[in-house]
Amino acid sequence: MELHSVLLTTGASVGFFNLVNRGLGQLYVPETAQRNIWKWRNIATSFVHSLITGIWAVLCFYMHPQMAEDLIETHSVFSHALVCVSIGYFIHDFFDMVFNQKINQSWELLFHHMVPRFTAKLRHLRQAKEDAFRNGDRVLYNQARNTLNKEIRVAKRSNAKNLENQFSSKDPASVWKGLKDIKNYKTPSPSTEANQQLAEDLNEFYCRFETAGLTPHTRSENLSTQPLTPPATPFSPPPALRISEDDVRQIFLKQKRRKAPGPDGVTPACLKTCADQLAFIFSQIFNRSLELCEVPACFKCFTIILIPKKPKITGINDYRSVALTSVVMKSLERLVLAYVKSITVPLLDPLQFAY
């Protein structure tokens, strides 16, 4: 095949695929699919390219069977035309992405992790470009398009930097979050059938070991009945627990933002962010609860979440029940636990372990 024939075939290929792309652009696209219109057009054009090159390859091997034995040394019009058609397709795709500003849409399937998060600013700029296009203002449309492309490039660099920071950090949660962002993976929420009968069955299942005929624990006769020797030093009652405002602030600042809230809806992120403002109020509530030896009823409420252990539920034992308690109540428990430990640790045997 001569050089002018190669150039002519390549040019004809470019024109053909441009014609295919324009024909696909004239097709009706539902309104719900307008967001991914160029992605599907690119897939359709790629399918036409593979179909044509596949037919060319079949004809080439049919007309020249020796090509299967030695593809390098065999030179035929079909093989050159096959290469020219492929080159024409990639030239068309290159011009389509660079000059028609379709880089993000065309490469979405290959470089999904480089696609920026569509923030409110990008959404506003895209709406401005669409308004300019509908109004027919060419100058304003070009300005809006250039501004949108610049902001997309900035968002891409920012997104790439965030992913790099997630992988370079030593936090496994950040690494997994980066992997999910790259793959666009969303954890499917477990579906459970919530009804009153299921609650009754679970209550009966978890309380099946509680019977009314259990006898209270009695002291064994084999134990020694010798009286205990009094301690060498008289036991002095510990001082009453008084929770300070600084203690509440410190326990609120240690909260993890990603933890689930309790039935009261108070999130750990709220307590951590507003620790300075809420420390005084909750210190008064905690101290009043300790004086009355009771806590508010909302602190003792909890929500039971059923997490399936298996994809297909066959019985009640396939559920894992998780109780979500109030974050405020857990904070009070940690403060009381620190006080109890400060009293009991000196009284424990240093060789004591486990229980």
Image: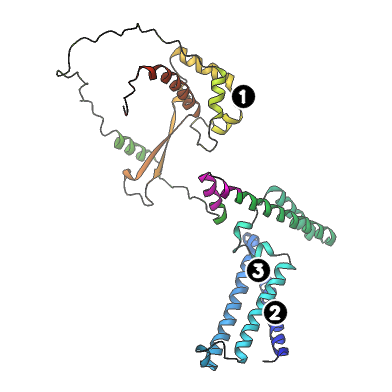
Which residue: 71% across, 52% down?
Answer: 122
Residue 40, percent from left and from top = 61, 67
Q: Is residue 178 above or below residue 35?
A: above
Q: Callout 2, which amino acid? A: Val
> On the rendered image, what quadrant is the C terminus found in?
top left
Give the residue at mark 2.
Answer: 14
Magenta run includes residue 166:
yes
Query: SS for tag 2?
Result: helix
Given the current orientation, which residue lies at the most extreme left position? 222
Which mark lies nearer to you, 3 or 2?
2
On screen, residue 308 versus residue 123, left or right, reads: left
Residue 8, percent from left and from top = 72, 87
Residue 117, which numbered label?
none
Which residue: 65% across, 60% down?
Answer: 35
Of residues 344 and 188, the one nearer the viewer is 344
Query: SS for tag 1?
Result: helix
Is there a contact, CB below 8 Å, between mark 2 and mark 1?
no
Magenta residues (range): 165-179
On screen, residue 211 versus residue 44, left or right, reads: left
Q: Which tag, 2 or 1, sits closer to the chain's start?
A: 2
Of residues 72 and 31, the one nearer the viewer is 72
Task: Tell me if residue 267 can be seen.
Answer: no
Give the residue at mark 1.
Answer: 276
Which residue: 71% across, 89% down?
Answer: 3
Residue 28, which numbered label?
3
Q: CA distance from mark 3 to mark 2?
A: 24 Å
Of residues 147 and 125, the one nearer the viewer is 147
**Which of the 4 quarters of the picture holds residue 210?**
top left
